[in-house]
Amino acid sequence: MKQNTKGLLLLAVTFIFSTFSFGQAKKWTLEECVAYAIEHNITIRQSQLDKQLSDISKKDAIGRFLPSVNGQASHSWSTGLSNDPLTGVKQNQTTESSNFGASASVDIYKGLQNQNELRKAKLSIIASQYQLTKIQEDVSLNVVNAYLQILFNKENLKVQQEQLAFDNQQLEKSNELVEAGVIPKGDLLDVKATVATDNQRLIAAENALLISKLSLAQLLQLENFEEFDIVEADTTSEESTILMEDPKVILGKAKETRTELKLAQTNVQISEKDVKIAKGAYQPSLSASYNIGTSILHRNTLFDSSLIPSFSDQFKDNLGQNFGLSLTVPVFNGFSARNNVLRSKIALERSKIALEQQELDLERTVFTAYTDTKGALKTHEAAVATLEAREGAFQYAKERYEVGLMNVFDFNQAQTLYVNAQSEVLRTKYDYIFRTKILEFYFGIPIIKKN
């Protein structure tokens, strides 16, 4: 029985371990994360539907140039005493009649409204594509930021693990020094407290890493995000060549490439077309029509019904058609056309102001991004210099502590400053990398460089 229990337990452990290993086998690269987010993000999918609606609107605009064709048919019965359609004599009878016809109409001229509707529809497709691209870029930047946050938390966790391992070694050495009478027992208690603090910091670092993983997994909208992990990419904080560019040059490049600016410009063009469409209502409209139809009559009476011609003869004899032109000249329509023109002009002014605001926002954003990137680089360089100094001070404190020339409080202070300096280097490193990505983005460099 014990052997069976052990066997089942071993099988269960093996299954759990294999399942866990299988789940951990997949690690996501930054490129995979961005591509997956673009494909599955809800806002992007909604924007793709908006683009499909713009495509349909273009088909509607094309359809306005085509004729409208309709067919119709009807059949009716009349029963009882009525005048005979041939003799005029009243008699009991059942009369059946059928009517068939077709009609077509087409706009010849409509104040160029159809042409401007088509031009507007084409611009709307362009605008919807710009809107989709803008959302994709925003999502990509969010993914990059979340990805770098995970990398930072991974490296910070390693720092905390190394610090805990070092303090555990110090705890062992402190035990030996206490036994040798080199340091008082109170110092040993302080070292134990430091180890306990290290464990707390380690737990906090593990939680921060877990939360950052969950944040990116949720951003990607993964269903099984519990085992989500990323590739530990080798990131460097070398100075980017983008800072060698003049901010005005970066701004000029941004004005040529930025999607939000192109979207605002396209919206102005759409508003201009709306004004032309509204003004088209002032002009006369001309349309052409064509109709063709025939009718068939059949009766059942007590008398001979052979006097009514056959169906085929009636179909040909009653066949008729007509052609027509219709000219409509607007004279007075309760100011509706005039008010529509005024509304469209106001919308045009709004779009122009929005474009002007977008240009100002872009200028401010680019110069702010440039300043932030330079500041992030200087902050990181200062953090590196501080770390070098703290590391030297810590090594000196360690040597003095081990020979009993420094108390444990001062040693812990030097150690804490050293650990904090390590974390600050990591934080400023990834902050600089992300801000560099943003500045390169405004310079027209893709967020993810494709091979």
Image (tube, rainbow, N blue to C red):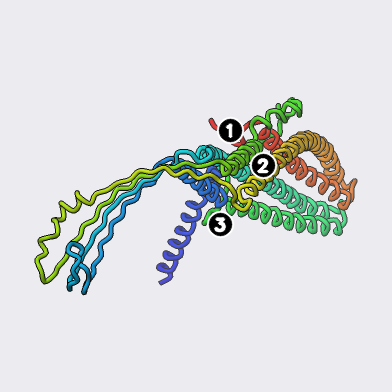
The residue at the far front in this view is: 88
Alpha carbon separation for disc pair 3 and 1:
29 Å
Callout 2: helix, strand or loop? helix
**Residue 385 x %, y %:** 82, 35
Horizontal side of 267 relative to 293 (left or right) equals: right
What residue lies at 47% left-to-right and 51% top-to-bottom?
22
Callout 3: helix, strand or loop? loop
Q: Nearer the viewer, mark 1 or mark 2?
A: 2
Whichever of labels 3 and 1 marks the residue nearer the N terminus, that label is 3
What residue lies at 45% left-to-right and 59% top-to-bottom?
15
Horizontal side of 42 relative to 429 (left or right) equals: left
Which residue position holds label 2?
348
Which residue position holds label 3?
226
**Residue 61's disc number:** none
How many numbered discs?
3
What residue lies at 22% left-to-right and 68% top-to-bottom?
83
Toward which corner of the image does residue 348 lie, by quadrant?
top right
Horizontal side of 100 relative to 301 (left or right) equals: right
**Residue 206 x %, y %:** 67, 54
Whichever of labels 1 and 2 marks the residue nearer the N terminus, that label is 2
In this rendering, is residue 304 above or below 259? below
**Residue 226 x %, y %:** 56, 57
Q: Determine crowd level at label 2: few under 14, some 14-19, many 20+ residues with C-alpha closer than 10 A.
A: many
Check disc 3 and give the amino acid type.
Glu
